[in-house]
Structure formats: C-alpha cells, structure tokens
Amino acid sequence: MAVPGVPAAAASPTASATDHLTRVIVAYDDAVAAARAVDRAGGKVGRPLSIVESFAAEVPNTQLSALRTAPGVRSVTLDGEVALQAERWRADGDANSMFSVVRATGALDVWKKDDANGKPIGGTGVGIALIDSGVSQVAGLNDPSRIINGPDLSFESQSPNLRYADTFGHGTHMAGLIAGRDPGTNFRTVDSPTNFTGMAPTSTLISVKVATADGATDVSQVIAGIDWVVTHRNDAGLNIKVLNLSFGTDTYQDEKLDPLSHAVEAAWKKGITVVVSAGNDGKTRTALSMPAANPYVIAVGAADSKGTESRTDDVLADFSTRGNTTRSADLTAPGRSIVGLRDPGSYVDVNYPTGLVPGDTTGRYFRGSGSSQAAAITSGAAALLLQQRPNLTPDQVKKLLVSTADAMTAGDVLGRGSGQLNIKKAIEAPTPTATQTWAASTGTGSLESSRGSAHVSDPVTGADLTGEKDIMGRPWTGTNWAKAATAGTAWTGGTWNGATWTGTALSGTSTTGRSWVAVGWTGTNWTGRSWTGRSWSSAVWDGRTWSGRTWSGSTWSGRTWSGSYWSASIWQ
C-alpha cells in the first residue's frame, strides 16, 4: 500500500533477494524522500500512520542501518507487532529509560543523601499536583499511600466508570516520570534494570483530571484545576509544593493579561513551584506556549540525548519550542523517546503503536517525546529540593535548578536556557537569595483569546465552546476572577465561577485509596443543553478543532486534533 501523496517508484533494491525482510515503522521528516529510501533499500512501503508522521514498511535486515541515515528519515523502529521477536529490551542499555535518566540527571546520587531529619531524599512529604488526563493504577503507580485522586474536572467526571481514570494515556506517562516506583524497589540503589523508578519516588502525587480520552479540555477547566490546587495546597496530607503542567495553548495574548498565565502566577506567589512545558513547535513559533510564556514559572525545553549516555553530544530536541530572545525556556531536561509507564487500552496506547518498546516482554513501557516529559522530570527534581530544604521559595527553587544546569555546547542556543537539569548539583549548591521582580499579571484579558486555536465541541450539537464563558455556560468576568485567584479563594467548597463542579473533601484512606468526592453536574453546558440529559458512559467529547498542540505533542497528527496541547511531541 502506498503512502498517500508519495508517487510510486520503480524498485532498485540494493539488497540481496535472499535478505530477510523486517517489519518496521519509519518516522519521516519528508514522506516522499523516506518512501524512496525504502524503495532504494529493496523494501516495501506499507500502511500510512500519518497521525504520527510515519508509515509501516518491510525492509531487508542488511539495509536497516543505511535507512536510518537516509534523507527524509527521522527514525526507524521495529513494528510493535514483532516486538516480542526482538532482542529483549533492557533499561540499562537504553539512554532514554528512567534507569538511565535518573543517573544522567544526578537523581540517583541525591537519593543516597539524607535530609535534616535523617530521611532519604526521594520527595517524602512533598505534594506534586499533576493537572492532566488522570492517572491509571498501573504497576509503579498503584500505591494508595502516595497517589491521590484530586477532583475530576473533566467531562468524563460524570461517568462513574471513567471518573479519575486516564483514558488518554498522557497523565499516566507523566506521573510515572515524576513519582513512579515499583513495589519493593530500593530507590537508593535502583541496581536492577527491571525496576521502574521516577524522579521523586517517595513524593505524594495529586492527580487533577481535566482531559478526556482524546485529550480534549477547555482552558476554563485547566484554570479551575490550578485554582483548586492553590485553594487546597495546605490541606492535610497534601502539602502541595509543586505543580506540573505539561500543557500549553498557542495564544499570543500578552502574558500579563492572559487568564491562564495569571492562574499559574497566582499559584507561584502562593508558594507553589510551577513547572510548565515550553511547547513543541520547534522553530515555527516565535513564543513559548501559554502559560510557559509567564516569566515567573519554570519553562522547560526538551533535550535530545542522541541515544548516548554522555551529555557532551546532547542538543535541544528539534521539536522543542525555541521562543524568542525575550522569553525562552529556562532550562532543558531529557525529552526525546523517554520510556515511561504504559496505560494499556488508552487512546495513546491504541493509536500510537510506535510508542511500544521493541523487546519489552513485560508490556509495561511506552516511549514519548516532548517538552511534557521534560517538564515532568523537572517537577520530580523540584520535589527533591523541597524535601531537602522545605522552606525554599519558588524563586529559590528556580534559581537553584537554572544556575546548576549542565551547559549544552552542541546545537541551537535559543531554547536551551541555561542548560540541562542536574539535580545533584542543585542539591549540593548553597541556598541562594532570589526574588523575581517581573511586572505582575492582571488576568483581566480574554478567556476566548487564552484558548488560542483550541476549542472543545458539544458532541450532540457540534457547537464549539467560544467566547467569554466556561464549560458550564457561566459568564467570565476577568476582573472578579483574577481578584479571587490572586487571593487563593477562587473555589468556595465545590463551587467555581458560580457553578458546582465537584465535592468538598477527600474520601477513602491511605490504605484503600483516596479520591476527591464527585458530584453530578446540574444545569446546562455552554450550548444550553442539560448535563443530565444523556449517558456519559463513553468518551464522546470532541476536540475536533484542536491542533494537537495543547498537551505539547507537536507532531501528534499535524494540526487536526491529536493531543498536542499536552506536550508529548511524538509517541516513539
């Protein structure tokens, strides 16, 4: 089967007719050039996977190395269908596994140190809020003493069988990088490559779900999630000191006016270190995504290890947003082909076979590339600092991480900030004096402008959510909201912006699992349609006018909805 738009070419094989053909996935920068390279290698182009800018192919074994360096070809990986026939994958042989990442970033060295109370530094006592698509209870994230379900503010919250669950797969991948830990793992050594360990393996992770199975969410839901984190940061058992937001919109609204920007700034000024993905638009966008554009927060770009353990050849990943000379990433962290925890049956798992890890006989792992992953790794590092020195301000955390980063001498300068994350150096550095003095945001800008090009659509009427209103159809008055957000009082019980979104307390225990109480939504949505007028048992909400940009996935499916707002550029 030919790749759409790729002209058929006469085969001119360079391989022997007796060469064994191997099924592979060819990711391309130029589809035509890549298909011709397969033809020249004596291979056959198969099914298109345009959603990830790839196609399947069969290629002679002897030509695989040449194909990987051919013009137009970004990467060549074994097709997931033959993964079990491949050489068994080992984390200690993969520079992009977390087994390798915790060594490269210095986290493993930090875990061997103790805090002032004699406890190993793994993030103990530090709450990390993850505003994302939920967290599934896969191995490594099934510890009810550390993994807490905050409120589900997504459209799926109205379906008990979907509530809190990660039907998309992005949130689970981020959660594993931040706080994953296999049962019984001695995180001080992590000497077995069969054990998975995230950056802050003893931290508390609070999941705030805002996205559905296709990643669809409205900016009003994300802002509501940030406001909830601020309101409940000091609740018993939470102690939220870090907020990870692997999300960004493509708005160019002034960050001093933008509501999303104001929300993260308000969280920062309430003592929460906010870590945001820089975006995945490479050189095509002249500004960071929002809210990474806010100068207070820690904006993280993605580094590419080039598949080696040494950092001397590391460069800024081609997809990582460069920004401009006024506002660019503050630092980078590993973000290319990072091996995290797989969420079986999720949207990402089903639709992105290139994310499967060839040779992974456990079926537990999945690769993802993007500033999402880089932000998650940095959030875990921030938690380590805050266990060591609980009184650090967000400004001091930022100063420590930025000032101790490893210099990157290869590749592009713009977009790499001060260099690549080195948490060992940050832990060993003296506490700095640091106070940022950027002009304060007002948050009085347009909610519609904050959405950029992304809009959710009602599945029945097809009506997009536009204008100055939230998903509940409640009018948006920026001046009133901004004042409450600044004070940390945007939530009153389970009410936000004049409507009831969720309950008022956690239920369950640290043994059985804790979840924020949910409520049934009453009234109508932005189209005037009743929330209670249909079944919510399936993932029906449509992000059809999105552009794959919000969850920071620059090449999810071009610029038709593919989850890119969630900053995982490529699932491979």
Image (tube, grey):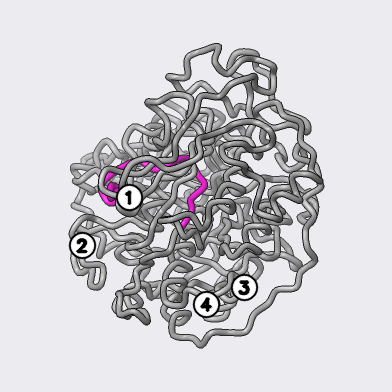
Q: SS class of the residue under badge 3?
A: helix
| Quarter where residue 271 is shown | bottom right
Q: Residues within 10 Å of mark 1 (few under 14, many from 20)?
A: many
Q: Of callouts 4 and 3, which one flags the residue occurring earlier in the amino acid sequence?
A: 3
Q: Of callouts 1 and 2, which one flags the residue occurring earlier in the amino acid sequence?
A: 1
Q: Residues within 10 Å of mark 2 (few under 14, many from 20)?
A: some
Inter-mark Cα distance, 1 to 3:
52 Å
Inter-mark Cα distance, 3 to 2:
33 Å
Q: SS class of the residue under badge 2?
A: loop
Tags 3 and 2 in contact by the CB under 8 Å rule? no
Residue at numbered disc 2? 185
Find residue 478 and report its horizontal and vertical position in percent.
79, 43
Which of pointers 1 and 4 indicates the residue nearer the eye? 4
Magenta range is 128-144
Name the main secondary structure of what is drawn in magenta.
loop
Above or below for 228 versus 239: above
Residue 129 magenta: yes
Inter-mark Cα distance, 4 to 3:
16 Å
Q: Label 3 is placed on what type of residue?
A: Asp
Q: Label 2 is placed on what type of residue?
A: Thr
Q: Label 1 is placed on what type of residue?
A: Gln
Which sits in the foreground, 377 or 469?
Answer: 469
Quadrant for the N terminus in the image: top left
Residue at numbered disc 4? 405
Give the side of residue 60 with respect to residue 380, left or right.
left
Residue at numbered disc 3? 395
